[in-house]
Image (spheres, rainbow, N blue to C red):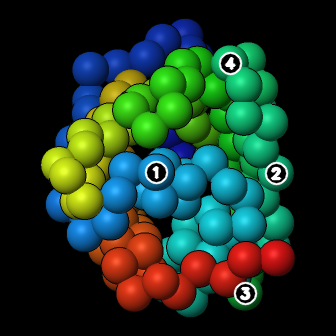
Amino acid sequence: MTPKHNPSGLTTDFRLSVTRIIHAPCTLVYQAWTDPAQLSQWLNPKDTACRSVSADLKVGGHYRISMDCGKGEHIAAGEYLEIIPNERLQFTWHWDHYPMPDSVITLTFEDLGGTTRLTLVHAGLPDQEDVTEHSQGWNMLLEKQAGMIEQHQFKTA
């Protein structure tokens, strides 16, 4: 990603939306987003290792995800804005190494009777280039997450 300069810090209208049908109950899909042990297993792009995940799952609580791509540490962090268990999760998103305004991710979990429709909306991205890059990343990560959930691959402590 090319660093962007946004001196005003204002959010933008650039957004993306990704929907996946996951063959698992809402409770399992929601847990994959809210349990730091599970997040650390899937929320890292290819050729990237997750060093640590911390999450204080409450409105106003913060999360921090530390990843290592071999060229250094990348940290995603933010604050939880809305939490409705098994239905909706909303939080800010920013990269510590990448100067861009906070964006907002909204996840909607729709129970389809044993399967779940997961919709991710990432709003407030700086430009179309970021929409394209984040869309590629989220699509890859959601595919990885769905596969792990459906194949019961999450390791528990």
Residue 81 location, quadrant:
top right
Q: Nearer the viewer, residue 88 or 26?
A: 26
| Labels 3 and 4: the sequence-earlier one | 4
Residue annotated with mark 1: 27
Asked if marks 3 and 4 touch (Cβ < 8 Å), the reply is: no
Q: Nearer the viewer, residue 148 or 128?
A: 148
Type of amino acid at the residue the image marks with label 4: Val
Q: Nearer the viewer, residue 102 or 54?
A: 54
> Nearer the viewer's eye, disc 4 or disc 1?
1
Residue annotated with mark 4: 59
Q: Is residue 94 left or right of residue 52?
A: left
Residue 120 location, quadrant:
top left
Rounded to the nearest whole Å, what is the CA distance between mark 4 and mark 1?
19 Å
> Nearer the viewer's eye, disc 2 or disc 1?
1
Q: Position of residue 27 (x, y in %)?
A: 46, 51
Label 2: element kind = strand
> Nearer the viewer's eye, disc 3 or disc 2?
2
| Residue 131 visible somewhere in the drawing | no
Label 4: element kind = loop
Q: Position of residue 155 (x, y in %)?
A: 67, 83
**Badge 1: residue crowd in 10 Å (few <14, some 14–19, many ≥20):** some
> Does residue 53 sit above or below 112 in this rendering?
below
Give the residue displayed 72% in from the left and 25% down from the top.
58
Residue annotated with mark 2: 54
Residue annotated with mark 3: 70
Question: How many numbered marks appear?
Answer: 4
| Labels 1 and 3: the sequence-earlier one | 1
Q: Residue furthest front?
A: 113
